[in-house]
Image (spheres, rainbow, N blue to C red):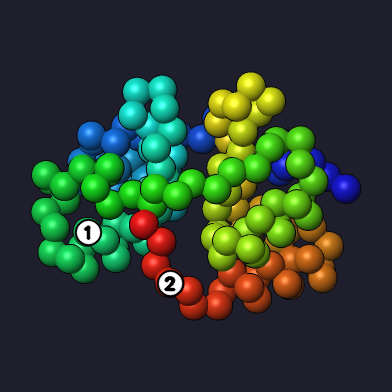
Amino acid sequence: MAAIKEIMTPNAETIQSPQTVKEAATRMKEIDTGALPVFDGNKLTGILTDRDIIVRSLAESLDPSVTTVGEIMTKDVVTCNENDAVENAAAIMEKNKIRRLLVKGDSGMITGIVSLGDVAVNADAQVSGEVLKEVAQPSEPKR
């Protein structure tokens, strides 16, 4: 059974909450990612996804040049430990209906990010299928 640290993307790029949505979208494009952990100084305050930008910014006609990341980010951040088994991350994603999970080290600091795709490729077929089915179900928007 693989540990999360073996499949995660280490040293995930981050963004500060006062930065603009335009700055975030530009960074996401440059590094080809769909999510950025959001910090206020050294404190984790949320996660910004490409979906947040569309649903909470663009769809609400907010100006991305002045709207801050902190205004539209997902505030309820779900994490796992880098030593957790891949199947544990799958269960967390399934329970919370999320596609990306921030990974913490034993010190409590963010050490990486793991995606549904990472889990699908590295977990057994039954676990992958179950988590994909559950995460794909429509749910209430999280904020």
Q: Is residue 10 visible?
A: no
Q: Nearer the viewer, residue 76 or 134?
A: 76
Q: Position of residue 23 (x, y in %)?
A: 24, 40
| Amino acid on which disc 1 is placed | Ser
Q: What residue is rendered at 73% in x and 72% in y?
A: 130
Mark closest to the chain's N terminus, 1 or 2: 1
Residue labelled with disc 2: 140
122, above or below 97, in the image: above
SS at mark 2 in the image: loop
Q: CA distance from mark 1 to mark 2?
A: 17 Å
Q: Nearer the viewer, mark 1 or mark 2?
A: 2
Q: What residue is rendered at 68% in x and 67% in y?
A: 131
| Amino acid on which disc 2 is placed | Glu
Q: Is residue 93 visible?
A: yes
Quadrant of residue 42 in the image? top left
Residue labelled with disc 1: 57
134, above or below 7, in the image: below
Q: Position of residue 89 (x, y in %)?
A: 70, 51
